[in-house]
Amino acid sequence: MKKLFLLIISLFILTSCAPAPAEDADDGKITIYASFYAMYDFARTIGGDCVHLYNMTPSGDAHDYEPTAADMAKLTEADMFIYSGNGMEAWAEDVAETLPDTVKVVNASERLTNLDGSDPHVWLNIDNARIQMQTICDALIETDPDFADAYARNMRLYTVKLDELKESYENYNLAGTTLAVTHGAYGYLCEEFGMTQLALEGVAGDSDPSPAQMAEFVDEVKARNVKRIYYDPIEGGKLAEKAAKEAGVLAEKFYTFEYDEQDRDYVTVMMGNLLGNEIICL
Ligand SMILES: [Zn+2]
């Protein structure tokens, strides 16, 4: 009886995890560094309280970040480094090569089959996000099998939410519509729902469009009868507002999930992108 009791107690501990202490203690939890917010959130969703997790680019500059010597020292001591790959973090592959074998390196895009090599914002496609989370989940289970049940359960629970999210997008019949944006980050999302992306800037969102490019974009917005121009708040809305004013339309937010000042999870942000913006009125 006592044995059974102990077994039940230990099972409970294994699958639920105690709350994380304020500071890293030698508590047996693995330490994970994620390259930017989306990867941080996916690892948080699957890892929960079972892991110590850090976002390497908390200010959201994932595209052109350079790790410091202090970052590298911490990474070297970590158990896992997660990045999205496909050109999103120019620095990550070089960093990964220098890490010791004790750090499990996870390229969350390694199982994606729809990569086009030019647009790195793969997670904005809901199916891709699910595959990235499953890749992270499997890496966690392999690296930290003591908490395998908790990781698998967290993935199962979140899959239900992802299914609901996808259904919500499908219900809006977005096929054939144009998504006009400043930062051309939404190619994979458009592909998933049959939309066409019309972008003022390239995939990195840091170009300075010429007056000719701006005029061409504005003409196209008018020609396609698009009602809104979307921008990611992390870049500020100046460019979108300028274009929207010239085209006589509205500028609205559409988060790329490279950063979130409200610390929200993927489904919440993507649902907000859909419903908050009334994307139906594209
Ligand atoms: Zn971006």
Image: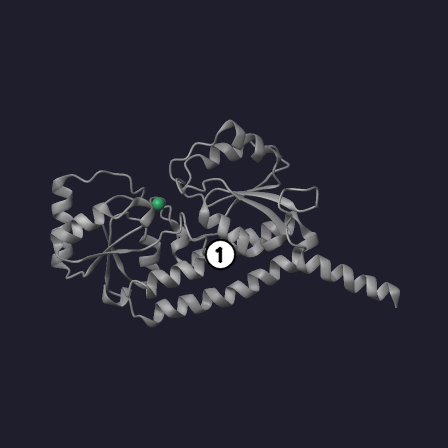
Q: Is residue 191 visible?
A: yes
Q: Estimate how packed mark 1 is, as few (under 14), some (14 to 19) or many (20 or more) residues with alpha carbons within 10 Å.
A: some
Q: Nearer the viewer, residue 185 or 31?
A: 31
Q: Position of residue 232 (x, y in %)?
A: 31, 50
Q: On the rendered image, what quadrant is the N terminus found in?
A: bottom right
In this view, the residue farthest toward the front is 22
Q: Amino acid at mark 1?
A: Ile
Q: Position of residue 158 (x, y in %)?
A: 52, 63
Q: Secondary structure at mark 1?
A: helix
Q: How is the image coloured?
A: one colour
Residue name at image x 15 percent, y 60 percent: 224
Q: How many marks?
A: 1
Residue name at image x 51 percent, y 64 percent: 159
Q: Which residue is mark 1?
A: 131
Place residue 81 in its image quadrant. top right
Q: Is residue 11 left or right of residue 90?
A: right
Q: In the picture shown, does residue 68 fall above or below 213?
A: above
Q: In the picture shown, does residue 170 fall above or below 147?
A: below
Q: Any atom of ligand 1 within 8 Å of the CB at mark 1?
A: no
Q: Nearer the viewer, residue 256 or 114?
A: 256
Residue name at image x 55 percent, y 65 percent: 157
Q: Position of residue 22 (x, y in %)?
A: 62, 46
Q: Position of residue 220 (x, y in %)?
A: 14, 54
Q: In what quadrant does ligand 1 lie?
A: top left
In this view, the residue farthest toward the top is 69
Q: Is residue 200 visible?
A: no
Q: On the rendered image, what quadrant is the C terminus found in?
A: bottom left
Residue name at image x 59 percent, y 33 percent: 76
Q: Nearer the viewer, residue 143 or 34?
A: 34
Q: Is residue 181 left or right of residue 165?
A: left
Q: Is residue 168 left or right of residue 14?
A: left
